[in-house]
Amino acid sequence: MLILGIWDGHDAGAALVEDGKIKIAVNEERLSRKKLDIGFPVKSIKCCLDNLGLKPSDVDLVACVGTQLSRVLARQFSFLDESFYLFRRRKIPKPCFERERRLLKYWLARYRTSWLRRLTEHQLRKKLKRLGFRDVKLRIVEHHSAHAAAAIFTSGFPRSLCITLDGVGDGLSGTITVYENGEMKRIAEIPERDSIGLFFEQVTTLLGFRELEDEGKVMALADFAYPYPKEKNPFFDFFSVDGMSIKARHGTMRRFLELEKLIWKLPRETAAYFAQQTLEEYVVKLFANAIAELGICDVCWSGGVAANIKLNRRIRLDSGLKNWFVFPHMGDGGLALGAALYLAYEELGILPKKLEDVYLGVEFSEDSIEAELKQWQGQVSWERVSDPAKYAADLLNEGNYVFWFQGRMEYGPRALGNRSILAPPDSLEVKEKLNLAVKRREWFQPFCPTILEEDAARLIEDYTANPPDRFMTMGYIAKKEHRQKLAAVIHVDGSLRPQILGEENKLYRKLISEFKKRSGLGVVLNTSFNVHGEPIVASPKDAIETMLKTGTEHMFLGNFYVTLGGRKG
C-alpha cells in the first residue's frame, strides 16, 4: 500500500510510505526557497512522485493533518497563509491591531468541532484533484497523533511511552501515548490553554525574535545570564504539574500580557534564562511523573518543544528514563511523515522500526551535477576528483571551510553530512570567517560538531549511548580538558549539540576519519549549507548560487571539486 502524507501548515511538506517503509520525505521550503514555507505543498508532492517515477493514480491513500479553524480558513482564503508568513518573518510592518490579531490567533487555534473535519476533507479533495488525484481515498489525521506516530514508528521500541508537546495543534498542546501490544493508546491530553510551548513562543516574540523559528536563540541566549534560583524566577508560578498534565495559571492571552509587563523590566538574557528554567523544570517533572506512573522507561519524544536540546539533556539525565528517541523532524515539518505512518499503522498494523538515517530527500546523478555546472561556466571552475573525502580533509586541515553536497538530502532541520558546511572544530578564526561570510548568525549562537562514535565518550563528559544521538537532538557537556580543541563547536557553558556518527554515512565518516589522521581530532564543525534566512540547499543550482553569493572558495558537489573563476577541469 502506497500512502502519501501531506501537511499544509507552517513548514509544509509531503512524504511517501510504501508498506510501512519510508520512501521519500521533503519539505516545501527546500523547493520553493522560502524558509519554513506555508500552504498546500504542491512542489513537495510532485517531487515525491517524480523521484519515484509514480503517478497520482499509483497512490492508494492520502493522509492529511489538521482540522483546527485557523487552518480551515487559510485553506479557503490562501492570502491568509501568505499574510501570516510575511508577518511572522518580519517582511511587513507590525500591524497596529497586534494584540487583537494575537487574541484571534489563540481563539482560532483552540476551536474544534466535527463540521471542520468535513470541510477540511472537501477543501483538500479540491486541491488534490488539481494535481491529478481523482478518486483517491483521503483520511484526516489529528495533529498530535501524527507527531506521536512519527516518533513511535521510527524509534524501534516494541513498547514505549510517547510524549508530544508543541505550541498548539488541533486544540491541544500535548499528549501522552502508550504503545504496547501493537496498539497506540492515548493516556492524557494537554489543552491549548495550558501550553508551555506557546509560553516559550510568547517569550521568543517579546524578546524581539521570530516566533516558530527563533526559539533556539532564546535557549542559546539564556546561558549568558546570571543563574538565578527558581525562587527568583517571576515566570515560575505561571505553571504547575498535576500528575501527567501541565496546568497554566492564566489563559493564553492573559499570560502574554503578563509576560509583556515582566519582560519589559528584564535584561534579554535574564528573561531568556527564566523562560528556559521554567520550561525545563515543568517538562522534566511531566516526564518523570509519566514514567513513574506508567512504568515504561523507553520513551519517544516529538513536537516543537522537543527541539530544545538543553531541555532534552535534562530529560535524559533527570527523568528516570532508560532508552529514548527524539524524532529528528520533531516540529510541524515532520507531520506529513507522521500522518503517513499513522495510517500505515491503522491500515497495515506496522511495527516500530528504528530510523537508521534521515537521508530521505532528493538525490542528483553525476551527469545532472555536471550539466548544472556547465550552466555556470565562466563563474565557477570544477574538476572531477577520485577521492573527495581525502581532498576535503586536506582543505580542513589547512584551516579552510568547505561546502559539502552529497547523496540524498536530509529530512528535517539539521544538516547531517549531505548538505553541510564543514570547518575545523578548534579554530575560532575560521568560525568567525564562516559566520561573517556565510551564516551571519547572532553573536551568542554556537556552531555544532559531528563526532565519530568511537571518540564521543572520550570528549563528552555526560555521554550516554541510549541510543547514540545520530540526529543532533541532544545537549551534552564537553570535558574540560578537550574544550580548547573544540573551541569552535562549544557554547559559553561548555555545552554542545553533536551528531554522533556511526556507519550510516560512509563517505562523510571517511572524510572525518581522514581529518583525524591529519589533526588527531575525530570531529568537524558541521553547520547547515545555507545563508542566513534561507532554507538548506536542495539542488546543485542552489549550492552554486550560495557559493557565488558568499564568495566561498571550496565546494564539493558529489565527486566534483568546485572553485570560483573560469573553467578548470
Image: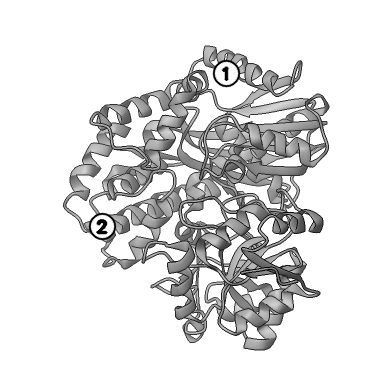
> Label 1: few (<14), some or many (≥20) within 10 Å?
many
**Is residue 113 among what the camera can see?**
yes
Looking at the image, is 84 positioned above or below residue 416? above
Location of the N terminus (image quadrant): top right
Looking at the image, is 328 positioned above or below residue 96? below
Query: Which quarter of the figure has residue 43?
Result: top right
Question: Residue reaching furthest left?
Answer: 265
Seen at 41% across and 51% down, the residue is 215
Label drawn at residue 268: 2
**Is residue 342 among what the camera can see?**
no
Looking at the image, is 139 positioned above or below residue 433? above
Q: Nearer the viewer, residue 354 or 218?
A: 218
Residue at image mark 1: 120
Seen at 68% across and 61% down, the residue is 377
The amino acid sitting under disc 1 is Thr
Q: Position of residue 130 (x, y in %)?
A: 68, 20
Q: Is residue 447 left or right of residue 337?
A: left
Q: Nearer the viewer, residue 281 or 423?
A: 423
Label drawn at residue 287: none
Q: Position of residue 190 (x, y in %)?
A: 45, 34
The amino acid sitting under disc 2 is Arg
> Label 2: few (<14), some or many (≥20) within 10 Å?
some
Seen at 76% across and 35% down, the residue is 49
Q: Is residue 335 left or right of residue 154?
A: left
Q: CA distance from mark 2 to mark 1?
A: 41 Å
Q: Position of residue 40 (x, y in %)?
A: 58, 29
Q: Assign a secondary structure to mark 1.
A: helix
Seen at 46% across and 67% down, the residue is 437
Task: Work out whether mark 2 precedes mark 1 in sequence or the reverse, and give the earlier one.
Answer: 1
